[in-house]
């Protein structure tokens, strides 16, 4: 396991530091492309989300992948901005679908403006992202990012139908995660390799890394929903349970449940009849069936897949930082 250079330092900070010049260009491009001559609400809504202190991890992954493969042109900046626009568009749409009131500790755009503005500005950002992709002149890039956009939407729709369905299994959960989270991670890293015209083996390794990192990230997120420290995560314990959103620890516990336990899940998740003490009981059931340990083990397995993919990449300080990123995601569980 790699050790981080300084106590308490985060690999995304090292990534940000290493890529600071390029990221300044990405931010400038985002600002110029989110402008609108005729609809001032567009930059207002976009700025609220873009300036809200997000980690900008996905665009940094694109820049890192391109540099790792020796790219020295300008289109990695276009692609990084594209990836951030797609991500921002999906967040705007997600908050409407989930009826969220808060994101990153601030009121959501749909709360400050309205659902219509959030949906339409999200659509505008998707359109802008495709304009940026086209400017690279690469059909392969267009193909990868268009495919990722379709996968994200597909994952969100699948989650709607799977969320309160007690028959949802781990394979369906993974399909949802691969769509709504991992698809953009994988596309972000892969297009960096493609724009650098890297060998096929490296492009595939970058895709595998992004996909496995995305799955690890989401499983850890789902575990933190039940086991995290709200002062660190910024989220309440048990939000997924309250929102009746079936995640990996719950799916594992339901698969192992006896008749009485199934009746509990049926009442609380399928029918939404939740009473005082139900969250604590749900957590106790997951613990009793070893669901937390099993999900943690799955996250570590995907972390290992991501790490082994990096072995196919050239020696580079960024390769070390990308390795540290995997450890950082997993270490959030401690």
Image (cartoon, rainbow, N blue to C red):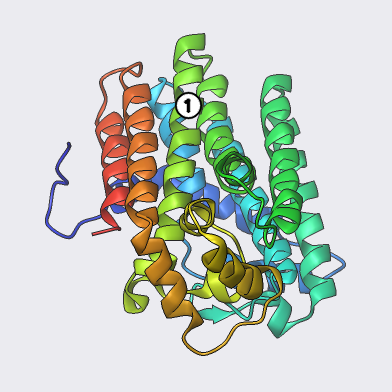
* Residue 135 picture quarter: top right
Residue under label 1, please give it. Answer: 208
In this view, the residue in front, 265 or 9, is: 265
Q: Nearer the viewer, residue 208 or 270?
A: 270
Query: Where on the picture, by quarter, is residue 39?
Result: bottom right
Horizontal side, residue 238 vs residue 138: left or right: left
At x 42% / y 79%, what residue is drawn?
280
Residue at 66%, 26% (x, y): give it.
141
Q: Residue 315: in sight, yes or no? A: yes
Q: Position of residue 19 (x, y in %)?
A: 37, 43
Above/below status of 255 relative to 92: above
Side of 128 relative to 18 (left or right): right
Left or right side of 144 for 174: left
User: Where is residue 66 shown, x and y percent of the image?
Assistant: 46, 28
Residue that lies at the very extreme toward the right in this rendered image = 38
Of residue 237 and residue 46, the one placed in the foreground of this image is 237
Q: Position of residue 330 (x, y in %)?
A: 30, 49
- Please report the residue visible at 48 percent of the width from the left and 43 percent of the height from the top: 214
Q: Secondary structure at mark 1?
A: helix
Quarter of the picture containing the C terminus is bottom left
């Amino acid at each position: 396991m790699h050790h981080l250079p300084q106590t308490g330092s985060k690999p995304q900070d090292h990534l940000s530091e290493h890529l600071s010049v390029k990221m300044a260009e990405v931010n400038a491009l985002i600002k110029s492309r989110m402008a609108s001559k005729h609809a001032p609400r567009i930059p207002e809504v976009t700025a609220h989300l873009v300036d809200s202190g997000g980690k900008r991890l996905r665009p940094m992954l694109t820049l890192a992948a391109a540099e790792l493969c020796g790219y020295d042109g300008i289109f990695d900046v276009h692609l990084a901005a594209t990836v951030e626009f797609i991500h921002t568009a999906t967040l705007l749409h997600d908050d409407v679908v989930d009826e969220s009131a808060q994101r990153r500790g601030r009121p959501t755009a749909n709360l400050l403006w309205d659902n219509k503005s959030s949906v339409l500005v999200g659509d505008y950002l998707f359109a802008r992202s495709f304009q940026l992709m086209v400017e690279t002149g690469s059909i392969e890039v267009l193909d990868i990012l268009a495919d990722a956009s379709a996968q994200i939407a597909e994952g969100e729709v699948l989650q709607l139908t799977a969320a309160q369905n007690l028959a949802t299994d781990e394979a369906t959960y993974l399909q949802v995660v691969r769509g709504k989270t991992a698809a953009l991670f994988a596309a972000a890293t892969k297009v960096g390799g493609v724009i650098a015209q890297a060998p096929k083996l490296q492009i595939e390794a970058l895709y595998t890394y992004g996909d496995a990192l995305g799955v690890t990230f989401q499983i850890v997120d789902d575990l933190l929903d039940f086991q995290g420290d709200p002062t660190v995560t910024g989220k309440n314990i048990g939000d997924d349970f309250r929102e009746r959103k079936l995640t990996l620890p719950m799916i594992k516990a339901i698969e192992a449940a006896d008749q009485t336990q199934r009746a509990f899940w049926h009442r609380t998740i399928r029918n939404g009849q939740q009473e005082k003490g139900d969250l604590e009981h749900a957590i106790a059931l997951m613990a009793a069936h070893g669901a937390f340990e099993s999900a943690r083990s799955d996250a570590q397995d995907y972390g290992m897949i991501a790490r082994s993919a990096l072995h196919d990449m050239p020696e580079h300080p960024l390769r070390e930082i990308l390795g540290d990123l995997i450890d950082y995601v997993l270490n959030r569980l401690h």
